[in-house]
Structures are given as C-alpha cells and as structure tokens.
Image (spheres, rainbow, N blue to C red):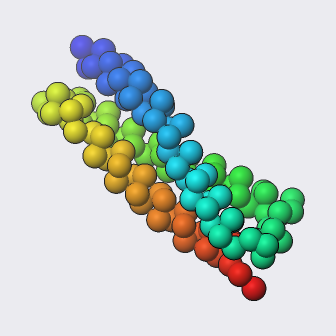
Amino acid sequence: METQLLRESATDAIRYWEPRRLAYNAILAGVVLTYFAANYPASKTVLSLDGALGIFVLAVIANVAYCAAYIPDIFAQMSGYRELWRRYRWVIFVIGILFAAILTRWFSLGMFHSK
C-alpha cells in the first residue's frame, strides 16, 4: 500500500513538474538574454568558450535546483493534504520561478556588466 502511494505521488509529481520545466527555462533564458542585450556591446566579451561553459554550468545548477520541488511535492501528496496540495502547488512553482529569476538576474548583472 505504501509503495503504491509513493509510486502514485512520484508519477503525479513528474506529470505536474516536467512540462513546467520548459516555462521555467524559457523565463530564465529570457532574463539572461535581456541583460545580455541591455549591456551590449560590452556583454559580447562573454561570448567565448569559457563564458559559454559558465552559462551552461549555471543552467545545469538551475535545473538541479528545480528538482528540489519534488521533495515537498511527494511528501505533501503522501499526507492527508494531498488534494489541497494539488490544488495550490502552483504557488510553489511561481515562488520558485521568482526566486530563480532573481538569482539569474544577479548572475547576469555580474556576467554582462558594462565596462
């Protein structure tokens, strides 16, 4: 019984979070591109192999951080608050996007600053 509930909760979490990962990445990419464009032409100095690798590493870290949503999601679904959680978990998604966008803005300001 417990294994079945864990399987259902994990499946539901994947079904909910993975399609939203596209929006998450698109929003963060938009933040990076906005700050790149706002500081152009000074920002073009980042266009190097090292700069591309740095951005890649930050993108991977952002996606690993996105996976942190699975922990409270599965935990909440296995509780007696499953239906309430499923109705309002979009709030965690919005808060997570805002937090990630703020961090992305901070890193973008550091990477693309005008000289």
Seen from the viewer's position, the closer of residues 75 and 58 is 58
Count of numbered labels shown in the rendering: 0
Which corner quadrant holds the C terminus?
bottom right
**In the shown orientation, is residue 17 left or right of residue 37?**
left
Vertical placement of residue 96 versus 71, above or below: below
Can I make out residue 10 in this image?
Answer: no
Q: Which residue sits furthest bottom?
A: 115
Question: Residue at horizontal 61%, vertical 74%?
Answer: 109
Vertical placement of residue 17 versus 2, above or below: below
Vertical placement of residue 25 versus 11, above or below: below
**In the shown orientation, is residue 35 left or right of residue 10?**
right
Task: Report x, y in % for residue 62.
Answer: 56, 52
**In the shown orientation, is residue 99 left or right of residue 8?**
right
Which corner quadrant holds the N terminus?
top left
Q: Which residue sits furthest left?
A: 80
What is the quadrant of residue 41 in the picture?
bottom right
Question: Residue at horizontal 64%, vertical 76%?
Answer: 110
Can I make out residue 94 in this image?
Answer: yes
Question: Residue at horizontal 57%, vertical 59%?
Answer: 31
Question: Residue at horizontal 42%, vertical 33%?
Answer: 17
Task: Report x, y in % for residue 102.
Answer: 47, 65
What is the quadrant of residue 15 in the picture?
top left
Task: Report x, y in % for residue 2.
Answer: 26, 20
**In the shown orientation, is residue 68 left or right of residue 59?**
left
